[in-house]
Image: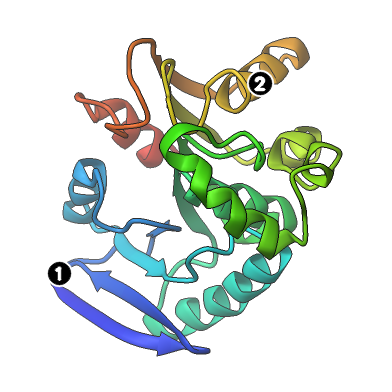
Amino acid sequence: MKEINFEFNGYSATVIIPDKPNGKWIWKTEFLHAFEDAELALFDKGYTRVTYKIHDMWGSPRAVRMMNKFHKFAVKEFNLSEKAILFGFSRGGTYAFNYALFYPDFVEKVYLDAPVLDLGTLTGPGEHLLAQVYDEYSLTEETVKSFKGHPICNLREFFDAKIPLLLIAGGSDEVVPFDTNAKKLIEFCDENGIEITSAVKPDCKHHPHSLEDISPIIDFIDAK
C-alpha cells in the first residue's frame, strides 16, 4: 500500500494505491475516511482510492472544471482507468452528480449516499451551510428557489448519459431532507422507467452513511 499526499492547482489531494492495483479507482468527492468500510473492501480488491479536497464549492461549475483537470492529471500520473467511479456522500453528492452531468465520458459509475440534490433544502444542523452555497453560486434565500442548477433540476440530462447509479439514503434524514432530495430522484426514476440500484433506510438519519451489510455496494461496483 502506498499513500501519496500532494497539492494540485493549490488544493490538497490524496491517492492511496493498493499493493495489487487493478487500474480502477474510487474517487470520493468529500470525506475520504468517513464510513469507509465499502471502500476498504474495494481497496483490498485492487481499487485505488482518490480524493481532491476542493471543499465548500458544492459541486459548482467552477468545482467540476477543477475536477476535470485533476482527473486528467490523475489518470496519467497514477496509471488509472480513464473513467472514475464516483462516491458522493452528503454535500459530496453535488460534486459527483454534477461531474457526471457535465463530464459523462469520464465517469464509469456513481454511488450517492444521502446526497444534496436540492441546494436550498439543508435543514437543522446543515442550515448554517447555506451561506456557503449562496456565496459559491451567487444566490440568495429568494433566488435559490427558482435556480435551475440544482442537481434535482437536471435528472433527465443526468440519466440520458446512462451511467449506472447506486443511491442510499436515510428516510429520516434531519440534515438533507429525504423528501426533497433522494426521494425526488427515486420518484423520477419510477415515473420514467429508469433502473437504478437503491436502498432507503426508513428510520435512518443523515448518519450513518453506507450499509451495515456492504455487499450490495461491493456488488454494484464490481458488476461489469
Classify mark 1: helix, strand or loop: loop
Residue 73, visible in the rendered structure: yes
Q: In which quarter of the image is residue 122?
A: top right
Amino acid on which disc 2 is placed: Lys
Q: What's the residue at 54%, 61% (across, down)? A: 83
**Image position of 179 (left or right of 35):** right
Nearest-to-viewer mark from 1 and 2: 2
Q: Where is residue 188 in the image (x, y as percent from the top left)?
A: 72, 19
Q: Position of residue 156 (x, y in %)?
A: 80, 33
Q: What's the residue at 40%, 78% (across, down)? A: 79
**Image position of 203 (left or right of 92):** left
Q: In which quarter of the image is residue 113?
A: top left
State the quadrant of the N terminus: bottom left
Observer-nearest of 171 and 195: 171
Residue 103, visible in the rendered structure: no
Q: Residues within 10 Å of mark 2 (few under 14, many from 20)?
A: some
Sequence-earlier tag: 1 or 2:
1
Q: Position of residue 151 (x, y in %)?
A: 70, 41
Q: Position of residue 60 (x, y in %)?
A: 68, 61
Q: Which mark is residue 213?
A: none
Q: Distance between the residues labelled 1 and 2?
A: 41 Å
Observer-nearest of 215 and 13: 13
For disc 2, the marked residue is 184
For disc 1, the marked residue is 19
Q: What's the residue at 62%, 34% (across, down)? A: 121
State the quadrant of the C terminus: top left
Amino acid on which disc 1 is placed: Asp
